[in-house]
Image: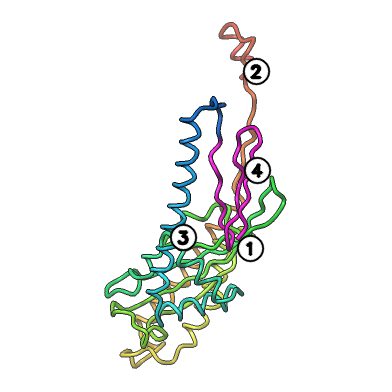
Amino acid sequence: TESKYHSRGGDLKTRRTGLGSAVTGSSLTTVLPASSTVKKSIVLSSESRKELAKQAKVTKEERRAQIDGRHRYLISRLADGIDLNEQQVEETIISDDKFQLIEQFFAPNGLKKLLFFYQDVLQVNCFYCIHIFFLTVCIWSYLQDFTGTCAFFLRTSDEVITASNVSQEVHFGMFDSTNGNILQGLEFFLSQIIIPALKSQQNWGAVKEGLKNSQIQEFLYAVDKFVSTLSSSRQNIEDKIQLTKVDIDIYVRNLQNPSDYITAG
């Protein structure tokens, strides 16, 4: 972890924190007179920062103590998939303000999905890349400017997730969006991995007929149709028409009467 402050003209510059999160200090826009009151405020501000850091450390250790076999399973899958070591993943997870989502995912009748995003971000002003890695349950909030990897966990039952059943009840997957097109990554994942796997599935549980069953065929048709719709939507977005912004003032500046407007039209 590297933390540096440079004060120029009252601006507190960005400091880097471990595994890619970036925290930006506030900008001071006024020059304060030198006085004991100001000095006292500065001291209190410093103490407040230390207290916040202390609380954050306590919170992290409390979360670390909660980690069990279920968390270890998620951490190991993420580390293997994103090519990080497990310690990096663990530190990121216990530092994330959405840590409680994991417990909600494990609970009976809990969340059906967990999403993890990982990507490089170029800091233009500083000319270096950082890595961001965060947890969420909503994908659409992060569609814009996402150019990394989405890793996800899904559960299909309402049973409580335990250390003994996590590998059977929780499914892990990833799709790539390094080209900046998360819809294309999702389309590829469904069309090249999920659909072929479903169509080659031999055991459909209580449905003895397997792929010959009409409901199974309708389900596969619906998935195919969804991927086709997704592909069409992606192409429409990519081929959308961008209207050029025009400064109309130069056209209407000298219009004086109805005939001028007709001529301009």
User: Left of 229 or right of it: where is 119?
Assistant: right
Image disc number at residue 139: 3
Q: Amino acid at mark 1?
A: Thr
The picture places residue 66, in percent across and down from the top left corner, at: 37, 74
Q: Earlier in the sequence, mark 1 or mark 4?
A: 4
Above or below 255: residue 83: below
Q: Amino acid at mark 4?
A: His
Q: Magenta residues, as a range?
A: 1-27
Q: Nearer the viewer, mark 2 or mark 1?
A: 1
Residue at the spot 64% in from the left edge and 24% down from the top edge: 247
Per the model, the C-alpha gap separating discs 3 and 4 is 36 Å
Q: Which residue is mark 4?
A: 6
Residue at the spot 61% in from the left edge and 75% down from the top edge: 83
**Which structural element holds mark 3?**
loop
Q: Which residue is mark 1?
A: 178
Residue at the spot 59% in from the left edge and 14% down from the top edge: 261
User: Left of 86 or right of it: where is 130?
Assistant: right
The picture places residue 133, in percent across and down from the top left corner, at: 54, 63
Residue 205 in view: yes
Q: Amino acid at mark 2?
A: Tyr
Looking at the picture, tell me which residue is in the foreground, 70 or 251: 70
Looking at the picture, tell me which residue is in the foreground, 216 or 8: 8
Q: Which residue is mark 2?
A: 251
Q: Earlier in the sequence, mark 4 or mark 2?
A: 4
